[in-house]
Amino acid sequence: MLLKHIGLVCSSEKNSDNFYENILGLKKMHSLTVPRTLAKQIFNLDIEYTIINYANDKIHFEIFVDEQKCFDNQKVEHVCIEVDNLEGFLNKCRDMEVEILQIPRGAGFLTFIRDYDGNLFEIKEKLLDGH
């Protein structure tokens, strides 16, 4: 298992840049806008929002910018992990009665699980070439 990224919330891009670039010394990689439809499917939020990625060769943060406090009552914080065998891992989750969310995306799915306390994990399968 490999930690791929950690998703956290920040109140503004300015605060996010100050902390992740200036204090942690990470590089601002790219930003993206998550459309309302996908936000609804993943987090049950009826909004469009921005994610900013900060990383170096050892760590990756996915920062959800929440200037309007839309995330106050909804968990978007998550940990993304990579597993060797996605189907085997999901079968184990089913056996252990762990909630699985699979959201159609392009030709595949975005896969999330919630632990017994509602913590959200994004699950990715390790690619054959290791990337």
Image: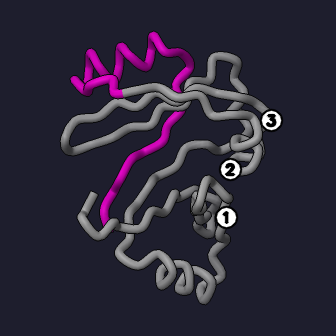
| Mark 1 / mark 3, whichever is N-terminal | 3
Instruction: Assign a secondary structure to mark 2.
Output: helix
Residue bearing the label numbered 2: 42
Q: Which residue is drawn at 42% across and 45% down?
A: 6
Asked if the magenta segment contains residue 36, the reply would be no
Q: Is 83 drawn above or below residue 26 in the view shown? A: below
Residue 28 % position (x, y): 33, 23
**Label 3: which residue?**
46
Distance from Cα at disc 1 to Cα at disc 2 = 8 Å
Q: Mark 1 points at which residue?
A: 101
* Type of the residue with mark 3: Asp
Q: Is mark 3 on a helix, strand or loop?
A: loop
Number of residues whose C-alpha sits closer than 10 Å to that of mark 2, classed few (under 14), some (14–19) or many (20 or more): some
Point 68% across, 50% down: residue = 42
Residue 119 image offset from top left, x and y in percent: 58, 57
The magenta segment: 1-29
- Report how far apart the C-alphas of labels 1 and 3 lie in the structure: 17 Å
Residue contact at pointers 1 and 2, CB within 8 angstroms? yes
Give the amino acid type for the residue marked by disc 1 in the picture.
Leu
Q: Please, what is the three-letter code of the amino acid marked with disc 2?
A: Ile
The residue nearer to you, when weighing 19 against 3, is 3
Crowd rating for badge 1 (residues with CA inside 10 Å; few <14, some 14–19, many 20+): some
